Image (tube, rainbow, N blue to C red):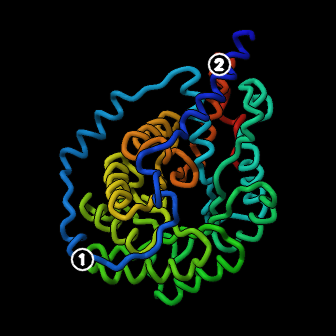
Amino acid sequence: MDGSSERRADVVDRVADAGAASPLASGRACSRNHPIPLDLDRIRDVRVNTSAVERRSQTHVARRTVKKEWQAAWLLRAISCMDLTTLSGDDTDQRVGRLCAKARQPLQRELVERLGIGELRLRVAAVCVYHAFVETALRALEGSGILVAAVSTGFPAGLSPLAERVHEVRRSVEAGAQEIDVVIKRAHVFAGDWQALYDEVAQFRDACGPAHLKVILGTGDLVTLRNVARASLVAMMAGADFVKTSTGKEAVNATLPVGLVMLRTIRDYARAEGVGVGFKAAGGIRTAKQSIEWLALVKDELGPAWLDASRFRFGASGMLADIERQLEHHTTGRYSAEYRHPIA
C-alpha cells in the first residue's frame, strides 16, 4: 500500500474510532428521554462555580489540538453531526433545495476521492428550516436518510400565546418534520417559575409525538450559568430529547462555558435517570478549529458515544466551508478560495 492509500485508510479508521463505547451509554442510556415529575428541590439545589467553569473552558482550548489524519477524521465527524440551517426572512424553495443538495453531498466529489472516504457515504445529520419549507425539504431529501427539522413555537423570541406555539409544533409534525426545534419563554427562567417552564416544554413534547424535541434555551439571554443549568434540567425532566444553546439570533450564542455547564447537566441526568439526552451547540460557530474544540469538549465530558448525530449536533452551516478548506489543505497542501465551497 502506498503512502497516500495508507493516509486515506487512516482517516477512515480514525472516524470509526471516534464512536467507541462510553460508560454512560450502557443500559437505558441509549433509550429516548421521557418526561419525569418535576422535582423543585432538585432544581433549587443546582449550583455552578462560574470561575471554575471559565478556567476549565480556557484550559480546554489551550491544551486540545489534533493534527494530520486525526484532524481530518474529527472534521469529518463534525460534518456528520451538522444541522444545515437556513432561517432567513428571504428564504425561498430554491434556496432550501440547494441547501438540501449540499446536505446530501457536503464535500465535493474530487475531495471525497482524494480523501478515500467514499465508503463512509458522508452526509449531514439534518436540514433545519421554517415550517413553510418542511415539505420542500422532505421532497429534496427523500431517500437520503437526512432528517428534516422545523423551528417552532414563535421562533426566535418564543413570546406568542402558548396555544399557538403548541399548534405550530403539531402542524410541523403533521407536515412530516422528524425533529422540532422549540424555543422556551425566557421570562419563566428570570422569574424562577420552573413549573411554568416544565408545563410549557411538556406540552411541546406531547405535541411532537414521534418527532424528536430539541429545546432551545437562548443561553445568551439567561444571564447566569446557574440559570442555564436549571433551565437545562427542567427541559430534560419535561422530556426534551436534546437541549440546544441558542437560536443563533441572540447577541451572544454558543460559548464553551455555557456548553460545559449543559454537558455536565446532561451527564448528571444520565447517571441519575439512565437516559442520554442529546446536546446541540448553535450560533457563532464558524470555523473548523471551533468544531474540534466542541467535539473534544463533548468527548471529555460525556465520552466518545456522544460523538454521534443521535446525541450531538452543530447548528453551524457557515462552518462547513471552512471545514472543506481544511480538508482540501490536508490532501493538497494548499488552501482553496472560500467561494469554491458554497452552501446555498
Kindly tell me whether residue 249 is visible in this rendering: no
Q: Amino acid at mark 2?
A: Arg
**Which mark, residue 163?**
none
Q: Amino acid at mark 1?
A: Leu
Q: Residue at x 41, y 50 (%)?
A: 24
In percent of width and height, residue 57 lies at 30, 40
Q: Is residue 105 above or below residue 279?
A: above
Q: Secondary structure at mark 2?
A: loop
> Earlier along the polypeptide chain: callout 1 or callout 2?
1
Q: Residue at x 71, y 77 (%)?
A: 175
For this orientation, the residue located farthest to the front is: 27
Specify the quadrant that holds the N terminus: top right
Q: Residue at x 48, y 25 (%)?
A: 66
- In contact (CB < 8 Å): disc 1 and disc 2: no
**Which mark, residue 40?**
1
- Image side of residue 180 versus residue 278, left or right: right
In percent of width and height, residue 333 lies at 64, 16
Q: Is residue 299 above or below residue 171?
A: above
Q: Secondary structure at mark 1?
A: helix
- Image side of residue 39 versus residue 35, left or right: left
In which image quadrant can residue 13 be found?
top right
In percent of width and height, residue 214 lies at 51, 66
Residues packed near mark 2 inside 10 Å, few (<14), some (14 to 19) or many (20 plus): few
**Which mark, residue 334?**
2
